[in-house]
């Protein structure tokens, strides 16, 4: 339901109409008001109320008997009718910047290293004793499968909506499983519980990473590593290290990213059961690290290795469930992104576009994330119309998922669009952006 206190946006087709652009440029408010009336259905009495003018004054302006010249009046018209500031020769107005573009990194307060290794998600002594009364149950393989099924469902929902709303449930289940680990059980059940706890800790870390709360993410990733190490699950340790490598690229720490993914590959190669799909995924993460460092030859070599490993995949491979997402479209889009990170936009664009066409419709974050990457590669090549069209298509899935990472990619495209802001296609994109991701009242542009 629209906010009654928020002024109605003018239609994008009006803001991009050459007649409206010219009328605003010369500040012909008689013509502006007439266009707003006929094209947007905002009548003179409404114009007067929204712009803090008297109805008679608006009528005189429309009739051509009065001009509006004072800067404070021009600013009230821009704000009341939601006309972008640059169209009237003004500075950018505060309402023009949607919330997604002013969100800053949400980092948890710094905590001591010892506290990081023991996240607040784990139960304290009092909780331990209470849980002990309720968890002395006989667990079976079916119970473990139920846990795994719930984790797969969490990941699906994370792709569709983001992890913010899921996190309390995931952390609650992590606490419960950690409580179960305190009892003595048959090795197969106990090892299964450790694996489930490790995956829940990794998922929690991922939700914090996606929210750009990096200290908390690292703490949970570290906990996942410790749990996996207890049962010597080297493939899963490699998976967690790969997540940490990806986070390092977002923190602009490419050397850390490369060190972490190299450690991940060492762990994977030391495990007898590591599959080609896992090795392919790790090689692609290595490509990301090299691309962030700007090393073209090493990036291309890692991409080639990723594709070589992928070609060796067999249907009978015992792939762990957590790597199932790394299918052919994911390989292709990550290849495009690696080229994009290197600045090889012409190579990246068709790869990302092909993968995006095959992206699952319910993966809202993936569709938004990859569409913004595609738009940036198009803009890098001077394809302004295509870039704005692609970015506009990305706004709907972006508005449906709570992901600060996606918002970050939107901000990067938005900043890249700055030299073209007065072009009609860019104005139309911004109008749609404000419609789907409303501005914060009183917020300032970055």
Image: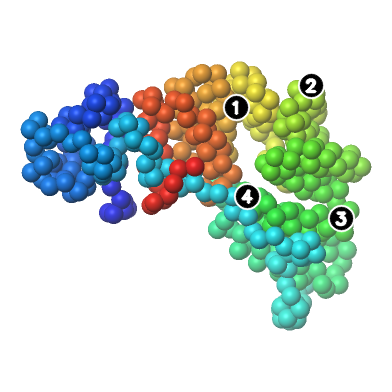
Sort mark 2 into few (<14), some (14-19) or many (20+) by Cα contacts within 10 Å: few
The mark lying in front, picked from 2 and 3, is 2
Residue 316 located left or right of residue 4? right
Which sits earlier in the primary sequence, circle 1 or circle 2?
A: 2
Mark 1 lies on a secondary structure that is helix
| Residue ranking furthest to the front | 70
Q: First in sequence, mark 4 or 2: give its number.
A: 4
Nearest-to-viewer mark from 1 and 2: 2
First in sequence, mark 4 or 1: give its number.
4
Reading the image, the residue beneath label 3 is 229
Q: How many marks?
A: 4
Residue 361 location in percent, x, y? 52, 38
In this view of the protein, which residue sits in the foreground, 121 or 308?
121
Upstream in the sequence, badge 4 or badge 3?
4
* Closer-to-camera residue (354/400): 400
Give left or right: position of 438 versus 311.
Answer: left
Task: State how far apart marks 2 and 3 are (Cα).
Answer: 34 Å
Tell me the number on the disc at residue 212: 4
Answer with mark 2 or mark 3, whichever residue precedes in sequence: 3
Check residue 297 in the rendering and tell me which mark sits there, or answer none.
2
Residue 25 in the image: state x and y as whole percent: 28, 26
Residue occupied by mark 1: 352
Residue found at x 26% / y 43%: 72
Q: Is residue 119 above or below residue 212?
A: below
Residue 360 visible (yes or no):
no
* For discs 4 and 1, the disc positioned in front in the rendered view: 4
**Residue 18 at what x, y percent from top left?**
27, 22
Depth check, front residue: 32 or 404: 32
Q: CA distance from mark 4 to mark 1?
A: 24 Å
Q: Is residue 208 left or right of residue 55?
A: right
Instruction: Give the spatial CA distance, label 1 vs label 3.
Output: 36 Å
């Amino acid at each position: 339901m629209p906010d009654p206190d928020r002024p109605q946006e003018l239609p994008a087709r009006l803001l991009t109409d050459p007649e409206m652009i010219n009328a605003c440029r010369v500040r012909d408010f008689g013509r502006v008001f007439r266009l707003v009336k006929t094209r947007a259905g905002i009548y003179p009495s409404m114009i007067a109320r929204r712009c803090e003018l008297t109805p008679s004054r608006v009528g005189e302006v429309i009739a051509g008997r009065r001009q509006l010249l004072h800067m404070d009046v021009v600013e009230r018209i821009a704000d009341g009718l939601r006309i972008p500031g640059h169209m009237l020769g003004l500075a950018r107005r505060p309402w023009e910047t949607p919330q997604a573009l002013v969100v800053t990194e949400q980092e948890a307060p710094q905590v001591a290293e010892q506290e990081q290794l023991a996240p607040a998600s784990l139960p304290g002594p009092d909780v331990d004793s209470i849980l002990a009364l309720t968890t002395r149950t006989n667990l079976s393989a079916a119970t473990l499968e139920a846990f795994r099924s719930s984790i797969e469902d969490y990941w699906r929902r994370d792709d569709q909506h983001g992890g913010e709303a899921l996190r309390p449930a995931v952390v609650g289940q992590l606490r419960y499983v950690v409580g179960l680990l305190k009892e003595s059980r048959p090795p197969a059940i106990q090892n299964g519980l450790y694996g489930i706890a490790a995956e829940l800790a990794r998922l929690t870390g991922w939700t914090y990473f996606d929210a750009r709360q990096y200290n908390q993410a690292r703490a949970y990733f570290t906990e996942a590593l410790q749990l996996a190490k207890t049962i010597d699950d080297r493939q899963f340790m490699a998976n967690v290290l790969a997540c940490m490598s990806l986070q390092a690229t977002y923190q602009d720490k490419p050397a850390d990213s490369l060190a972490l993914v190299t450690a991940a590959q060492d762990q994977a190669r030391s495990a007898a059961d590591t599959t080609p799909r896992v090795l392919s995924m790790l090689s692609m993460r290595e490509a990301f690290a090299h691309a962030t460092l700007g090393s073209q030859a090493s990036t291309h070599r890692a991409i080639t290795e990723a594709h070589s490993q992928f070609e060796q995949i067999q249907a009978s491979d015992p792939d762990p469930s957590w790597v199932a997402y790394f299918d052919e479209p994911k390989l292709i889009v990550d290849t495009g992104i690696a080229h994009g990170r290197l600045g090889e936009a012409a190579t990246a664009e068709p790869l990302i576009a092909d993968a995006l066409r095959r992206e699952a419709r319910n993966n809202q974050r993936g569709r938004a994330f990859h569409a913004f990457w595609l738009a940036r590669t198009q803009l890098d090549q001077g394809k302004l119309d295509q870039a704005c069209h692609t970015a506009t298509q990305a706004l709907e899935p972006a508005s449906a998922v709570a992901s600060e990472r996606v918002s970050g990619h939107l901000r990067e495209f938005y900043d890249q669009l700055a030299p073209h802001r007065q072009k009609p296609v860019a104005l139309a994109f911004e109008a749609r952006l404000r419609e789907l991701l409303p501005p914060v009242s009183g917020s300032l542009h970055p």
